[in-house]
Image: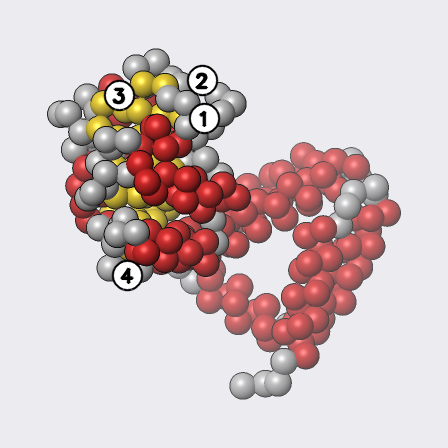
């Protein structure tokens, strides 16, 4: 394998992806202004220098730097190169990248990493959408990547990832807040066991029960979460998730039936 792949950003994800690409035989060039390049990666002095000669660019710097990285690299990208953005950014950012790329004939692929990269490396489940997504996926698969292609524009992969994040990260944050409050109340062991049992007992019917029950009992549950938020605050814990739950139930209760 002699693919030349550029990796921009050597944070937690970028460094592990670059390491695995090198191990799989890719010629990897990269740049990060703060983090040294992993072993085997050709270190460069800028994003533009890193992408020179690469057939595939993996931008893994940050959502705030995603557009700037592409704009600063446009003149250095070779014809036919694919720009793949792996940052956790809003779909609108991915769409903006596609617009910038389109104006210069650079195809932009949106790649969403659907699990933590530590422990997975290049085997992390990924989704790709946008222009030349199939080609980007083919190159990465040659080096052992676990990536599926979605038919649709840049932003579709990010949409799926972030919708999942609303659920999963929201649940995780609520659990952390509840356990912090339970610790302050001297009931951490009890609540830990209760949460573990609840999670173990979930099945396919749980989702329907949660959605229908939340809407049907929104008024009562809004009052309940107001009381919960007051208790959490009294325990000295910031009631961020409890208050958010209160507000969501109040919004649902105010919606017209039907």
Q: Residue at x 57, y 51 (%)?
A: 170
Dot placed on the residue nearer the N-terminal end, 3 or 4? 3
Helix or strand or loop: what does disc 3 sit on?
A: helix
The numbered dot on residue 87 is: none
| Residue occupied by mark 2 | 36
Specify how the rendered protein is coloured: secondary structure
| Residue occupied by mark 1 | 32
Which image quadrant is residue 131 in?
A: bottom left
Q: CA distance from mark 2 to mark 1?
A: 7 Å
Dot placed on the residue nearer the N-terminal end, 2 or 3? 3
Q: Nearer the viewer, mark 4 or mark 1?
A: 1
Q: Is residue 53 toward the left or the right of residue 11 in the image?
A: left
Q: Residue lying at the far top in this picture: please name it.
A: 39
Q: Residue at x 63, y 48 (%)?
A: 174
Q: How many numbered tags mark residues here?
A: 4
Q: Residue at x 68, y 44 (%)?
A: 177
Question: Is 226 in front, or is 23?
Answer: 23
Q: Is residue 180 toward the left or the right of residue 170 in the image?
A: right
Q: Are marks 2 and 1 in contact (CB under 8 Å)?
A: yes
Q: CA distance from mark 1 to mark 3?
A: 17 Å
Helix or strand or loop: what does disc 1 sit on?
A: loop
Q: Are marks 1 and 3 in contact (CB under 8 Å)?
A: no
| Residue occupied by mark 3 | 22
| Residue occupied by mark 4 | 152
Circle 4 residues within 10 Å: few <14, some 14–19, many ≥20? few
Q: CA distance from mark 2 to mark 3?
A: 15 Å
Q: CA distance from mark 2 to mark 4?
A: 36 Å
- Give the image location of residue 247, x and y in percent: 70, 65
Question: Is 251 in front, or is 231?
Answer: 251
């Amino acid at each position: 394998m002699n693919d030349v792949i550029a990796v921009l950003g050597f944070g937690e994800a970028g460094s592990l992806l670059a390491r695995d690409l090198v191990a799989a035989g890719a010629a990897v060039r990269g740049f990060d202004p703060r983090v040294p390049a992993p072993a085997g990666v050709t270190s460069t002095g800028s994003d533009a220098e890193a992408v020179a000669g690469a057939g595939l660019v993996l931008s893994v710097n940050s959502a705030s730097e995603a557009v700037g990285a592409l704009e600063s690299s446009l003149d250095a990208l070779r014809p036919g190169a694919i720009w793949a953005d792996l940052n956790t950014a809003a779909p609108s950012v991915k769409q903006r990248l596609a617009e910038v790329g389109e104006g210069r004939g650079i195809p932009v692929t949106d790649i969403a990493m659907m699990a933590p990269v530590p422990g997975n490396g290049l085997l992390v489940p990924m989704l790709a959408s946008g222009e030349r997504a199939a080609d980007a996926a083919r190159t990465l698969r040659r080096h052992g990547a676990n990536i599926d292609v979605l038919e649709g524009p840049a932003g579709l992969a990010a949409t799926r990832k972030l919708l999942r994040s609303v659920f999963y990260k929201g649940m995780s944050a609520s659990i952390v807040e509840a356990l912090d409050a339970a610790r302050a109340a001297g009931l951490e062991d009890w609540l830990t066991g209760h949460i573990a049992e609840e999670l173990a007992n979930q099945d396919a019917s749980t989702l329907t029960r949660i959605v229908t029950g939340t809407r049907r009992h929104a008024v009562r549950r809004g009052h309940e979460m107001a009381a919960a938020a007051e208790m959490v605050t009294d325990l000295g814990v910031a009631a961020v998730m409890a208050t958010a739950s209160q507000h969501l139930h109040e919004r649902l209760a105010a919606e017209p039936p039907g």
